[in-house]
Image (cartoon, rainbow, N blue to C red):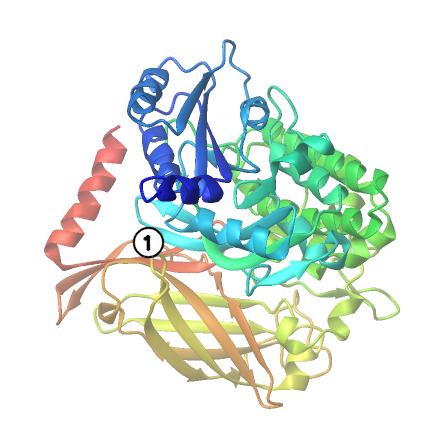
Amino acid sequence: MQAGAPHASLAHRAQVCVVVIGYEDAAHVGDAVRSALAQGPAVREVIAVDDCSTDGSALLLDRLARDEPRLRVVHREVNSGGCGSPRNDGIDAATAPYVMFLDSDDVLPPGAVDALLSAATGRGTEVAAGLCVRRELPLGREVRWQPELYAGAALVTRPSRRVRLVHDTLCVNKLYRTDFLREHGIRFPERRFPYEDFVFTARVLAARPRIALIPDTVYVWHVRRSAERLSISLDRSGVDNWRARITAHALAYDILLAAGEKRLARASRARFLDHALRMYVRELELRGPGYRREWWALTRAYLATFDAGDFALAPAPGRVIAQVVLASEKPRDLTRVKEVAARPARLRPPYARAPDGTPVWSADLPHVTLEHLLHRPVRLLPVAVDAELRPRARGTRLRLRLHELYGRMADAAPATVDAEFVHRRDGHTGLTLTAAFRPDDHDHDPDLTCDGSGVDSWTAEAPADLAALGSGTWDLRLCLRFHDGTTRETTAHASTGPGLLRRTVVPSARHGVLLVQPYATQAGSLAVRIAPGLRGTAAVLGRRLKRLLH
């Protein structure tokens, strides 16, 4: 009996199948499989589906399976071209009561399966979901995916009661009851279908499962931006990627609507406006004219299928961007639209008004109204702050200019600003500056609107001891404070005047020398790269020279 007891316990606990899919990923698939097996006795089986790889992945998996009875390898005879078919193979082959999915270049953190299984069995739910973190490699910086949804444990008895569920389109941070998927015919789109997660998630929500949410980290999504073969979510340089995303979004919407889940369907469209639209708009200036024209036409056609209720649910920045796209047949105002797409959003001058005084996007597009700016709380306004960082031998200074916004800044009365330099990799604050705003007394810029206050901008300036930051990339974050007691957290637009965004070597009492490069991020925000000391300066300049030679 004693010898049999552990086996009985194991049989009771072995309830989960982990489906690992991979293609041409011999460098990582072993780590993924081992992370699944290391979850312990809760895992009955790991099914590794190789999608007809030619790089040795299949042989590697077969070798692992010879020493691990819980590992089964499924060899596809024809490459599917996508992620959906291999995952469907895993669902078909699963014998365990629960199933979850793992991509070959990611890993499950210790305890992930136990946490999800305990939530599903303890709450009696068809689905359990936990937190996913995006880990940037090789730096190791981690960003939590949809943290608001997983702030604490919760039971969702019907998805329509938690519409934010449509924001988490991932399938990999969830545990599903196998018979639930089979009974409802829930599968991934077959063959090559980018963003297959969107469709699968919509099919799950349309079946109205009970869902247990937990705050535990259950999945580590590895982001390899320098990989030779980029993931679908990173490979956005071609317009086909945008076309595929729209197709997946549209199908997911149709699935939810057909199931009678109108609230979820509309929430999915609000998610499109706030996430996908803003993300791709931030990159438009990086693309060629042909891409921009085709992207614009595709987006206009898709947005034309939205109704007023769809737009009403989306946060203001996505709505404004959509209005601009719909109002113009050709790409326009890309720099300004990019700033609105930033997080937090920034609306840069000029600030036009319609004849009746209503704020509008521009004199050319007066029907794109911005009336909401007159009523939104100051803490949510898309304030525009320009930033200049001037490294000099006699000391570096940070200069900030806050623009008026239809009279709202003057009403709140700018007082001070806290400027923080935050390390890009680990998020710690290396330097905090505080400066007072003063009204600008220059001749008024004709492109700006004073709105009767007599002031069109305010300036704050402070010395910045960049030597205190150390090496790395630092993002500038601001907290604006107003005399009426309100605050607004935002970022600053990187001013691009002559000599502002260039590498500068400055003397440093602490390091000898300091290589400083202020630059504009993809969203137009000011950031700075620091390389202290002669060795750090030489390393950066050497890498730059090597790139120029190549």
Residue at the location (32% across, 16% down)?
Answer: 59
309 on left or right of 476: right
The answer to whether residue 521 is above or below residue 50 is: below
Give the image quarter of residue 380: bottom right
Q: Position of residue 421 (x, y in %)?
A: 36, 68
Residue 17 coordinates in the image, percent (x, y): 50, 35
Q: Nearer the viewer, residue 272 or 377?
A: 272
Is residue 454 visible in this depiction of the protein? no
Residue 350, image x and y in percent?
A: 67, 63
Name the kind of residue labelled 1 in the image.
Arg
Q: Residue at horizontal 43%, vertical 41%?
A: 8
For mark 1, does the 10 Å Cα neighbourhood hold few (<14), some (14 to 19), or many (20 or more) residues?
A: few
- Residue drawn at x 33%, y 53% is 502
Figure quadrant of the N terminus: top left
Foreground pick, 192 / 353: 192
Res. 5 image quadrant: top left
In the rendered image, the quadrant that contains the C terminus is: top left
Above or below, 84 relative to 487: above
Residue nearer the viewer, 390 or 210: 210
Q: Nearer the viewer, residue 480 or 459?
A: 480
Q: What percent of the width, then of the height, locates residue 263?
A: 81, 53
Which residue in the protein does label 1 denote? 502
Residue 191 vertical position relative to residue 203 in the rendered view, above or below: above
Q: Is residue 307 visible?
A: yes
In the displayed image of the protein, which residue is found farthest to the top? 77
Residue at image position (61%, 35%) is 178
